[in-house]
Image (cartoon, grey):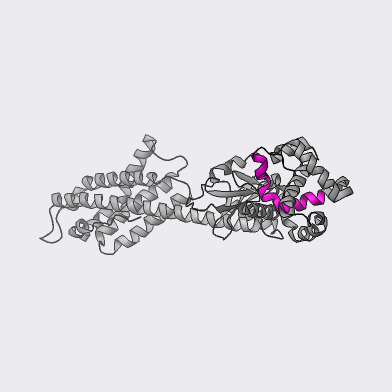
Amino acid sequence: MTTTPLDARPFAAIPDWVGTRLRGAIGTVADELLHEMLDDGRTAPGVDAGDLRAAIETGLGHFCDLLEDPGTGWDRVATFYRAIGRRMARDGRDPAETHQALRRSTLAAWRGITAFSDLLEKGEGTQAPSATNLLSLLVEAQFSYLDAVTSVVTAGYQAEARDAVETARLRRARLLALLLADPPADPRVIGALARQARWPLPRTVAAVAVRRRRGSAARLPVPDDLLVDFGRPEPHMLLPDPDGRAALLEPLTEDWVVAMGPAVPLVRACESLRWARDTLTLAQRGAIPDAGVVRSAENLPALVVFRAGELIADAAVTRLAPLRGLAPAQRDRLTRTLLALLENNFNAARASKRLRVHPQTVRYRLRQLEGLFGDDLRDPRRCLEMELILHARHGANGDRMTDDAEVLGQRVP
């Protein structure tokens, strides 16, 4: 914020002895103003009368300082009031309190000046201004002083508020890093930092990994109670007490792919983040839908396959060997049919809806598969292995398993 500069011209036009003489009236003026404020009930709750009187006296003293030293006195005064503005921001007080106090001090100073106008009678130098001219210059100086001090207090307040926001952001980013550390950080350190960051430690959390959608330039409107870190190549967040709160993430999903890990105890937050990142990777590859909040808990088969990618690739050589000698088109049809049957417990009617073909076509293909795989299709462990393998290979198109010929109404085995 650019502050209003002090107009020192009226101060410079006033002889320095005026400030010295007025300084002697400060105590009396401060007492009168304090009594008036106390009688009218214009003091803030909990404010000590002695502290208030000292503040009034200080403000009047600063005005006299400028009368005595208009050239260099302002720097000291500005530093003082800038610190007051910062302190008010730290204490959560409204800077309007200071502005009101300054106006009251100005009014009190004016009353004091007029009450002691005899002090301003010309007595030092034949070229000294008349009392009337001095009063006029003092009024102008007071307005300049009030504007400049008010501006400096506001600037100090805003600077402290900005610093407080940045400090809170840094503390929360540090807290997030500690909570996601593996192994977990010292609970005492986490507790102390959480109190400084004003983030109550929850019992459970869910990590959230995000990635900007292509062509999106939107910023993330993140709720205040989430810990966030978008300064890394892989932005992530921590959602406290996540049960029933995933809706808070919905506004992000239009411009970001949002993957939410499972709800876990706070000490296992790093595990939730690993699942969230794996889920995000699968969504980015198209292996699972990326609309809305993509939850790890709702995509367990795909995640298990993703984590065991190399092992499943090796197992596929053996478990899917019976399909190897078929023509590509037939192999593709039977592979997709096998996955649909495994997912639907070999119910041909439900599998046909998934494949969008006639149930009789599914039954015909099932007989072909039984001829190829034999007893393996009656072994629950073998079926589970094949389902995982097929998810790894065809999960990306799991919702689009169609056969062009079937779409045209033909029953092609």
335 left or right of 227 in image? right
Q: Nearer the viewer, residue 41 or 161?
A: 161
In what quadrant of the picture does the C terminus appear? top right
411 left or right of 155 in image? right
Residue 251 screen position, x and y as percent: 54, 43
| Membership of 394 in magenta stretch | yes
| Membership of 107 in magenta stretch | no
Residue 114 screen position, x and y as percent: 21, 45
| Residue that sits furthest to the left in the current view | 126
Q: Nearer the viewer, residue 138 or 258?
A: 258
Region rendered in magenta: 384-413
| Residue that sits furthest to the right in the current view | 375
**Is residue 344 shown to the viewer in this render?**
no
**Mainly helix, strand or loop, the magenta region?**
helix
Residue 260 screen position, x and y as percent: 64, 48
Residue at the spot x=70%, y=41% of the render?
A: 355
Please, is residue 124 above or below residue 113 in the view?
A: below
